[in-house]
Image (cartoon, grey):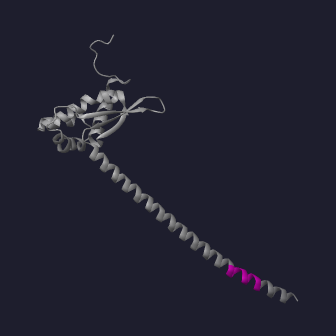
């Protein structure tokens, strides 16, 4: 029996598990919404909440502790500048775990792990990606039209060259016939 055995091993050795959790914490802070397995989401929740609590403290020591755990300086800056103040009056429960069904390949249970209040950020990100996608589609259509126009121009030029070459060939054959007579 697993009496008083806390935490999840996640099928990894200690260093691999620590790296996985650090990467997940950093990704959640940067992206504000992450898709992962349910077990990993439950395992990483206390770590993210600890980082947000450090951000709420906001002193230099807290920033250094967060920097020693998280992977990038940008994530620490975002944590202390935007996420910490957002949860300033909240006493915990900064994350939401949403079950998302089962993965097709191995049947693992999928969950979305997101910060509370990240709906605005995620919606803005979706709009931005939709704009980028539409610009990319328009650029591709424009390039296709230009390629088609160039191909048509080349085809017209090639047909004109062929038409010009044909009468010369006829003239040459007539001269040779007349010369033979």
Q: Is residue 168 above or below residue 80?
A: below
SS assignment for the magenta stretch, majority: helix
Left or right, 91 with respect to 107, comes to: left
Q: In the image, residue 89 lies at what x, y percent?
A: 14, 37
Q: Nearer the viewer, residue 157 or 169?
A: 157
Q: In the image, residue 11 lies at what x, y percent?
A: 38, 23
Q: Nearer the viewer, residue 67 or 42?
A: 42
> In the rendered image, which quarter is residue 96 located in?
top left
Q: How many marks?
A: 0
Q: Where is the N terminus found, in terms of image quarters?
A: top left
Q: Is residue 114 above or below residue 162?
A: above
Q: Magenta region: which residues?
A: 163-171
Residue, x 22% and y 44% (percent of image)?
Answer: 78
Q: Which residue sits furthest left?
A: 59
Left or right, 108 with respect to 30, comes to: right
Q: Which residue sits furthest right?
A: 181
Residue, x 28% and y 16% (percent of image)?
Answer: 5
Q: Is residue 63 above or below residue 142?
A: above
Question: Would you say residue 30 sits in the magenta stretch?
Answer: no
Question: Would you say residue 168 sits in the magenta stretch?
Answer: yes
> In the rendered image, which quarter is residue 10 located in?
top left
Residue, x 16% and y 32% (percent of image)?
Answer: 91
Left or right, 134 with respect to 55, comes to: right
Q: Where is the C terminus found, in terms of image quarters?
A: bottom right
């Amino acid at each position: 029996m697993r009496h008083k055995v806390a935490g999840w091993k996640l099928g990894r050795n200690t260093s691999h598990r620590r790296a996985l959790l650090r990467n997940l914490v950093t990704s959640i802070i940067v992206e504000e919404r992450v898709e992962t397995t349910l077990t990993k989401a439950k395992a990483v929740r206390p770590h993210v909440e600890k980082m947000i609590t450090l951000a709420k403290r906001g002193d230099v020591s807290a920033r250094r502790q967060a920097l020693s755990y998280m992977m990038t300086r940008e994530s620490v800056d975002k944590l202390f500048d935007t996420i910490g103040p957002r949860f300033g009056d909240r006493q915990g429960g900064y994350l939401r775990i949403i079950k998302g069904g089962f993965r097709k390949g191995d049947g693992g249970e999928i969950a979305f792990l997101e910060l509370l209040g990240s709906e605005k950020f995620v919606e803005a990100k979706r709009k931005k990606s939709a704009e980028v996608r539409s610009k990319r589609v328009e650029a591709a259509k424009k390039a296709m039209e230009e390629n088609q126009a160039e191909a048509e121009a080349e085809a017209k030029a090639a047909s004109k060259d062929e038409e010009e070459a044909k009468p010369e060939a006829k003239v040459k054959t007539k001269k040779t016939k007349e010369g033979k007579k």
